[in-house]
Image (cartoon, rainbow, N blue to C red):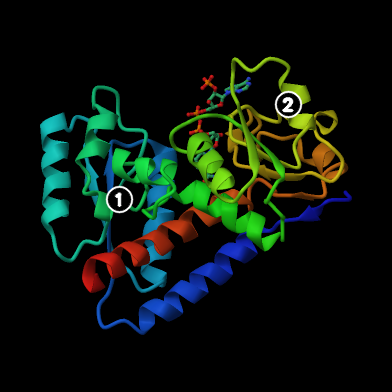
Amino acid sequence: MTATLIDGRVVAQSLRAELAARIATLSFRPGLAVVLVGDDPASAVYVRNKDRAAVSAGIAAQTIRLPAATSQAELLAVVARLNADAEVDGILVQLPLPAGLDQAAIIRAIDPAKDVDGLTPINAGLLAAGQPGLVACTPLGVMKLLAHAGTSLSGARAVVLGRSVLVGKPVAALLLAADATVTIAHSRTRNLQAECRRADVLVAAVGRAEMVRGDWIAEGCVLIDVGINRLADGRLVGDAAFAECAAVAGAITPVPGGVGPMTIACLLENTLTAALMRRTG
Ligand code: NDP
């Protein structure tokens, strides 16, 4: 391996410690409500991790568990109650929601000032317009890792693999705001490999195990791997073939231990940001 390892666990840990120290100085405890509908095992693990991390940072966290059979109206009523609760600064509805629920309508119902996942159209629109708002946690984590790695973004060629509302689009908007020249590639992109090879910075968010191979990337490129894919043998891998890419890249994130821990740390940061905006104006 020749690439520098960008260790998301270390960066996330120091961000979490910094947030805990800042929260300890406040005269109130920021509140976070996480809503989990149904019993998807992966979602249950994510929610438990978020709850623990929030509590250890000094955030008053609550998890609202609802049965898979919850109706749209019932879930909207829960969101409305949390919107109106003065002690709740951040609301996160864990995705994906069970089939039958209109995910977009639920997200739209969240008060944008409490939207710590940055997914409401208001916050997504503010990001697209280059104005301050709450930014989606995973994209925020990607940018913090790039900053930690000392990556120079101004004028750099950045390629984002994936155009989801959750990851690809907001990452691209943030890279553009940082003055990179951004290409967004997706399943219809012609000659994906050639697009990737042009990248000084490559962010892979496709959800395809080890799709990006060593000969897809330019020597010295910075590769941020957002993908989390579980193989049949139980191993977790990213969207890039790690060993091959680490032999070519200048810097690379591992999976697990790269972007994943940053997502949770950024959720805590967004909760503090939302609390300060709401409570101190
Ligand atoms: P989505 O499935 O919503 O989006 C995937 C994107 O990748 C789409 O834009 C799709 O293109 C594109 N894509 C799929 N297959 C190909 C292909 N063969 N070639 C080129 N592009 C392709 O996924 P998410 O954005 O939600 O997540 C992406 C990955 O990141 C997943 O592995 C997910 O588990 C992980 N993730 C990790 C997080 C973390 O904390 N580390 C948080 C969130 C997600 P098209 O639009 O054309 O269909």
**Residue type marked 2:** Glu
Which residue is at the front of the view, 85 or 195?
195
Sequence-earlier tag: 1 or 2: 1
Q: Report the residue at 41% width, 79% height from top.
A: 22
SS label for mark 2: helix
Is 53 placed above or below 24 here? above
Which residue occupies 53% across, 35% down?
A: 168
Name the spot of residue 94 as percent of width and height, x first: 34, 42
Left or right of residue 271: residue 202 = right
**Residue sitting at x 74%, y 30%:** 196
Quadrant of image for the C terminus:
bottom left
Counting other residues with Cα less than 10 Å from the Cα at mark 1, is it few (<14), some (14-19), or many (20 or more)?
A: many
The answer to which of 22 and 127 lies nearer the viewer is 127
- Separation of residues labelled 1 and 2 (CA atoms): 34 Å
Picture quarter containing residue 54?
A: bottom left
Residue 237, visible in the rendered structure = no
In the image shown, does 128 or 36 lie closer to the viewer?
128
Residue matched to label 1? 115
On screen, 24 above or below 253?
Answer: below
Q: Position of residue 253 (x, y in %)?
A: 70, 49
Comparing 173 with 254, the one in front is: 173
Relative horizontal placement of residue 76, taking residue 169 as reference (left or right): left
Q: Which residue is mark 2?
A: 195
Spot occupied by residue 156 in the image (x, y as percentages of width and height): 72, 45
Q: Residues within 10 Å of mark 2 (few under 14, many from 20)?
A: many
Q: Is residue 251 above or below residue 60?
A: above
Report whether 43 appears left or right of 274.
right
Q: Which mark is residue 85?
A: none
Q: Dot 1: what SS?
A: loop
Give the residue displayed 42% in from the left and 57% down from the top.
Answer: 267
Residue 134 seen in the figure? yes
